[in-house]
Image: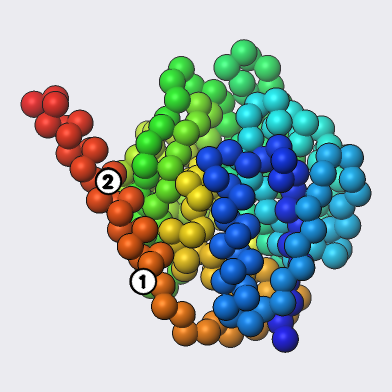
Amino acid sequence: MAKIRICHLYPAHLNLYGDRGNMLALCRRAQWHNIDLEVTPIEPGESINFAQCDLLFMGGGQDSDQKLVAADLKKRQAELHKAVEEGMAIFAVCGSYQLLGHYYTASSGEKISGLEIVDLYTEAGPKRLIGNAVVKCSLWDPPRTLVGFENHAGKTYLGPSLQPLGEVLIGYGNNGTDKKEGAVYKNVIGTYLHGSLLPKNPWLTDKILEKALSYRNQVFKPARLDDSIEQIAHDSVIKLATSKRHKKLSSRV
């Protein structure tokens, strides 16, 4: 039986807007796909053996939590970078996504040094970017849509070595201007989408499981699943986001 070992980083600190639901989705779909899953929660100060980790899950957190995480992981930066280059998977949401880059400049002007795992940087903007989002993802075949909820003041800009996770159809994405959302590097996926993201986007959950399996040269053999309930949840977000955008445009006329 295929097996994935997940390290759930700081679950008590990184759990904004239902991010823990992403872990529930990963566990349930792994079970349905007949994948043995071992989940290890990691708290601040505890040792992390990245050699024993196939997938690192990092949820969203406030600036104070982000500083705590940054300080803790900085001690293991070289080890983490080595694991990523060798193919370890990471799924990082919002504040943790920002933390993977070079730095995050807070609204106070304080510059929080990042882990420099991926080529991006983030600077706080004058207003929060909030709302339901719809994103077109064409990185894998077939192209799909992603839906989620974003709430961030940080504006993230990608370097030339990164691909965005998708193109923003509705919402703000990385910075509200370039229509890019998230970032993908090797087996690392970063995104601003909360909500929880994975229960409403089962295809992405499976893609993350596939990436984690590939790290140990295991093959993902998906079961044939009925995703009708997940699709209803997905479509409801698109309907809500489209309706709100239509109302906003109508109010400007």
Image position of 181 with respect to 33: above or below: above
Work out whether residue 179 can be spotted. Answer: no
21 vs 156, nearest the viewer: 21
Q: Position of residue 144 (x, y in %)?
A: 37, 64
For badge 1, the amino acid type reads Ser
Q: Quadrant of the N terminus?
A: bottom right
Pointer 2: residues within 10 angstroms few (<14), some, or many (20+)? few
Calculate the distance from the C-alpha at mark 1 to the C-alpha at mark 2: 18 Å
134 vs 166, nearest the viewer: 134
Q: Secondary structure at mark 2?
A: helix
Image position of 222 with respect to 164: above or below: below
Residue 218 occupies quadrant: bottom right
Q: Residue at x 68, y 74 (%)?
A: 213
Q: Secondary structure at mark 1?
A: helix
246 vs 169, nearest the viewer: 246
Q: Position of residue 32 (x, y in %)?
A: 57, 78
Residue behind mark 2: 240
For badge 2, the amino acid type reads Leu
Residue 85 occupies quadrant: bottom right
Q: Quadrant of the C terminus?
A: top left
Task: Give the side of residue 26 with respect to residue 39, left or right.
Answer: left
Task: Give the side of residue 131 with respect to residue 60, left or right.
Answer: left
Residue behind mark 1: 228
Pointer 1: residues within 10 angstroms few (<14), some, or many (20+)? few
Q: Position of residue 118 (x, y in %)?
A: 65, 47
Work out whether residue 169 can be spotted. Answer: yes
